[in-house]
Amino acid sequence: MDTHNNTTNPVILPLKGVRVLELCNVAAGPFCGLLLADMGADVIKIENPSGGDTLRTWPPITDGFSENFASLNRNKRSITLDLKSPEDIAQLHELVRTADVLIENNRPGVMKRLGLDYDALKAVNSRLLYCSISAYGQTGPRASEGGFDLTIQAMSGIMSVTGEDGGAPVKCGVPLSDFAAGLYAAYSVAASLRHVQQTGEGAHLDVPMLGTSLAIAALQTSEYFGSGRDPGKLGSAHPRNAPYQAFRCSDGYFAMAAGNNALWKSVCDVVVMPELLDDDRFTTPTLRAKHQVALRDLLEAKFLQQTGAHWLQAFAKVGVPSAPINSYSQVLQDPQVEHMDWVQEITLPGDNVTKTFVSPIKINGQGQPIRMNPPALGEHNEEVLQQGVTTP
């Protein structure tokens, strides 16, 4: 149904022909499935007949259908199976025989109790890649503990460096731990498909949210390893660069990042404060970071004399990276977003047309198309279960 890739170049779907079974709820697992689906995989979402993925209940709800759910479940087919029913388990085994990948994000032990753990399904399909996403991993002292994005952001240290110095603990406004796990899971699946191709053997992929949250904090963990000190909260500022943060101006705030000496000189030129170049506190990035509160105060005294638009235009002219503090309504209408065709229409069950943010990746200049709209619960039961599994 793609109408957006209308050049003469064919759309490349690198995972076309790969079949994925998704037994997941809410965010991390469905995001992994979405990434694979956008790249062409045939993702069959297996849901409980009584309600399905709990994300289906999250507002905003349009004519009974969750737009949150829609954002993570395009390009997938939905079937319903009761995993406590022997008949439905038998149907799942038939699907496993045709699958390349299975994704699940249950608490460790749940799939084993259902007789659907990796060892059980490996006996059905020895080439199966079985990807388990969990809070802490499949083994270890915390393996049996559950977790959500909030608790993993807290456990992983993310909340200790988020917010203003001295302020209450806050989490990142985007569910960073959920989506980092989904990204690592999709990356691991895509990479492991090569292993299966070479050896004919499947594998069990263990993707822990705690581990992936720590992995994307490489700069923070290395700061601790190198100094023996915990990184702290700096608001929007940077521990090793300055000026590099949000600054007040006459009508609000804007962000500006001068991460090297050449850019720092351009900042001094724009604010017409050449004396800062000779100030011993500000001669290197390290010194500027050390004295960044004093530097911020000096710069903001000047920034408060003009609007954010004035300063953004001035910094753009000399090549200093800067940006407005956008709301989502603002950034989604940005000319760059429009140029990249990242916001597209999608149709929900009931023929309600809404918009969604599509895959941001282009291959040979082509974006990854919306091939299928987000499915109603069990929409593809007949197509998959009664007619046999065929590629849509």
Image (spheres, rainbow, N blue to C red):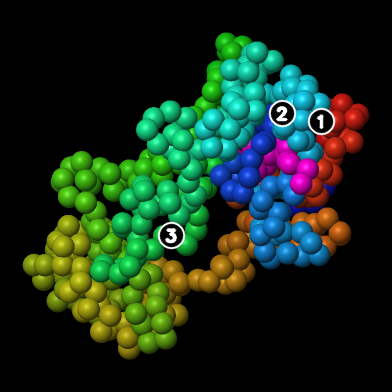
Give the Cα separation between the discs numbered 2 and 3.
34 Å
User: Which circle's residue, 3 or 1, is located before the other in the chain?
Assistant: 3
Report the amino acid beneath label 3: Cys
The quadrant where residue 165 appears = bottom left
Residue 262 is at least partly visible in this image: no
Q: Are marks 1 and 2 in contact (CB under 8 Å)?
A: yes
Q: Position of residue 220 (x, y in %)?
A: 29, 48
SS at circle 2? strand
Residue 308 is at least partly visible in this image: yes
Q: Position of residue 75 (x, y in %)?
A: 74, 44
Give the Cα separation between the discs numbered 3 and 1.
39 Å
Q: Which residue is mark 1?
A: 391
Label for residue 172?
3
SS at circle 1? loop
- Where are the magenta residues, as a range? 32-50
User: Which quadrant of the rendered structure holds the C terminus?
Assistant: top right
Label for residue 19?
2
Q: Position of residue 193 (x, y in %)?
A: 59, 23
The correct choice, above or below, for 371 with respect to 70 in the image is: above
Which residue is rendered at x = 50% and y = 38% of the image? Answer: 134
Which residue is rendered at x = 25% and y = 84% of the image? Answer: 301
Report the amino acid beneath label 2: Arg
